[in-house]
Image (cartoon, rainbow, N blue to C red):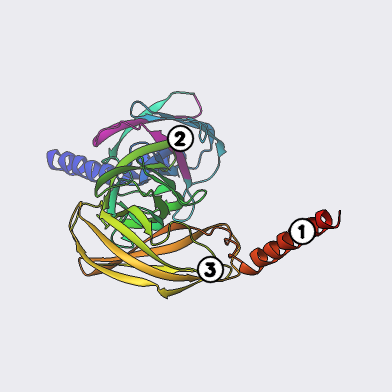
Amino acid sequence: MKKLFITLMMFSIILGLFVYPSVNAASNVDTAYIRLTLLNQDPDPAEPGKYLELRWKVTKFGNDKLEDLKFELQPEYPFSFDKVDTPIKTVGTWMGTSDTDEYYTLYYKIKVADDALEGDYDLDLGYSYGDGLVTTQTYTVRVGEKIEPELVLGEVKSSPIKLLGDTSENQISIELLNIGDDSAENVYASLDLPDGFKSSYSYSTEKNLGNIIAHSSATSTMYIDIEDYVKEGDYQATLNVKYKKTDDDFYSNLQIPINLEVKGKPTFKIESVEYSKNSIEPGDTVDIKLILKNTGSNDVESVSIKAFKESSQPIEFSEKSDFIGTLNVDETGDGILTLDVDKNAMAKKYLLDIEIRSIYNDEVFIQKEKIPLVIEPKTKAFDSRNILTGILLAVIVILSVLLVKKSK
């Protein structure tokens, strides 16, 4: 009897082990519930100052329907909602059971604070259905370093390579490098120039460069004129850059110093102009002596002068150039030109074009000047026939008077 009891008890226990799970499963097969799985965050890690997209896979278990299913994301710093999304998502009634291909994707788009620090942050997602009880689950979201554009000065080139005073349309090419990890958008550059420098023409020192993507560059080409009084030396200009960062509505500003190196060049002053005649008249041959002074900052070689005439000028040069030689700083030298004035030249003041040529550092420099040439009216020549005619007339008059007196 005892053995039979023990046998029945063991059979009951074994039967219970097989029957209870089936009963329990049968009792839960209709009870509905959901499971949430965070699929991804985009980008990963999130970027400070930008938007973050989150997606959950929502799976339904049980045959019973779910009524009034709602989700609510509860962000805290450094996350927040703005106008692009809302915290509450309403699904409503959900029938049936999820399978491999049937599930609900929960999507949120939130903003990451611009000053968010790198690290892991908790984000709470609550959901409710049926009786309205809220279940909250916490997820970890990664935030990385702030990704921004970073503009720095690249290569600066000029054409011509040597900038000189009294020149125009010098080309300045300025390269901007974006060494950051994000694009700089709507980049606009303008060049502020020091005294003695100016824009060659309207907007020639301004440039719209568009977008400069990360780890790339763009070059702005400017055109400037340099006044004649600008001496040798270094001059500082300022490149003003404004641009937008991704998702920003305002412009960021940047000032970059640009060095403009002006090289010295020969400069001369015509100290005096001497003419071989005090009064120059039509038909004259005239020597013109020019005395030059080296007013530059360097000694120069092979200094010479050369004259040019316009087709309307009533002169011809018999000696139109002269070699002066080496002139040291503040030293003077002279050259002589010879011209013939046309005999029918009109009396007036003429301006003659003069070129002063010199060599410095194996480079030829030309300085253009003008000198005056004043032609006076031609003096009337002495005519002896008029004197003889006068004498004859006087003799006739005297004789006539004497004859009249004698006859009386």
Tag 3 residue: 310
Nearest the camera: 227 or 376? 376
Give the residue drawn at x 86%, y 53%. 408
Q: Are marks 2 and 3 in contact (CB under 8 Å)?
A: no
Q: Using the image, determine if residue 215 lies above or below residue 116.
A: below
Query: Label 1: few (<14), some or many (≥20) within 10 Å?
Result: few
In terms of depth relative to the viewer, which is nearer, 374 or 356?
374
Compare marks 2 and 1 and give the one earlier in the sequence: 2
Choose mark 2 or mark 1, whichever is in front: 1
16 magenta-colored: no
Q: Which residue is the site of mark 2?
A: 250
* 78 vs 258, nearest the viewer: 258
Give the SS element for disc 3.
loop
- Identify residue type, mark 3: Glu
Q: Which residue is mark 1?
A: 397
Q: What whole-number distance in Å separates the C-alpha atoms at marks 3 and 1?
A: 56 Å
Q: Are marks 3 and 1 in contact (CB under 8 Å)?
A: no
- In 3D space, how far apart are the residues under numbered discs 2 and 1 (Cα atoms)? 109 Å
Q: Position of residue 161 (x, y in %)?
A: 29, 62
Horizontal and vertical percent position of residue 152: 28, 48
**What amino acid is at disc 1?**
Val
Magenta stretch, residue numbers: 105-131
Amino acid type at circle 2 is Phe
Query: Mark 2 or mark 3, which is nearer to you?
Result: 3
Q: Secondary structure at mark 2?
A: loop
Q: Label the magenta part by its dominant secondary structure.
A: strand
x 76%, y 61%: residue: 399
Residue 45 position by quadrant: top left
- Among numbered discs 2 and 3, the one appearing first in the sequence: 2
Viewer-nearest of discs 3 and 1: 1
